[in-house]
Image (tube, helix red, strand yellow):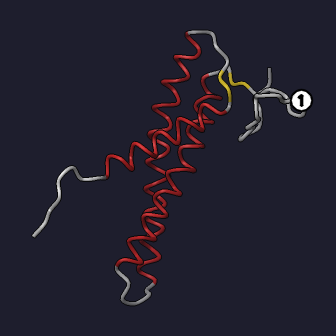
Amino acid sequence: YFTPPFPSLYWPINNEKYSLAYLYYIPDIWWFTAAWTMIFFSGFYAISAMIAIVSHRRTFDLYKVSWVLFYLFVGVLHGFVSGTVIGFLIGVMYRAGLFGMSTWIPLCVAVVQVLLVVISTHSSFSMTI
């Protein structure tokens, strides 16, 4: 067994061109999950920073660029922490069942984590004046 290179996404249905890519060991599952989660979270936080800058546009300052970098740092840190927790959790579950994990699973888990953050940012009550 060798660990497939990072994205290693393949189409599993009617696939003759590419070989199957499975993850069997917990460090491999952790790395794929954490990497995908950091990629998606940094993108989500960068878009959030851009929306915040555009909504508060008065002048363009270098100060606002530092906010984008700060948001990116927080997004990567948030992605690493949540990717680590979920990566080890699903790694242990797959290892306990002696299953091989498709390389699509960490990508799907990262998308679900970002959607969970998006849903949790919505306020359940409106503040009307």
Task: Work out which residue is located at the far right of the displayed protein and give it.
Answer: 17
Residue at 52% in and 16% down = 93
Query: Residue 97 appears at what percent x and percent y?
Result: 57, 9
Instruction: Work out which residue is located at the far front of the displayed protein and give it.
Output: 14
Report x, y in % for residue 26. Answer: 60, 23
Q: What amino acid type should be assigned to the residue bearing mark 1?
A: Glu
Say which of 80 and 110 sits in front.
110
Vertical order, 121 against 6 (above or below): below
- State which quarter of the image contains the N terminus: top right
Find disc 1 in the rendering and name its residue. 16
From the viewer's perspective, is residue 55 above or below residue 22? below
Label 1 sits on a secondary structure element that is: loop
Q: Dot 1, crowdedness within 10 Å: few (<14), some or many (≥20)?
A: few
Q: Residue at x 50, y 43 (%)?
A: 80
Task: Left or right? Give the position of 105 relative to 49.
Answer: right
Is 109 left or right of 8, judged from the image as shown?
left
Q: How far across and how far down the image is residue 126, in percent?
A: 17, 58
Pick out the residue farthest to the bottom.
59
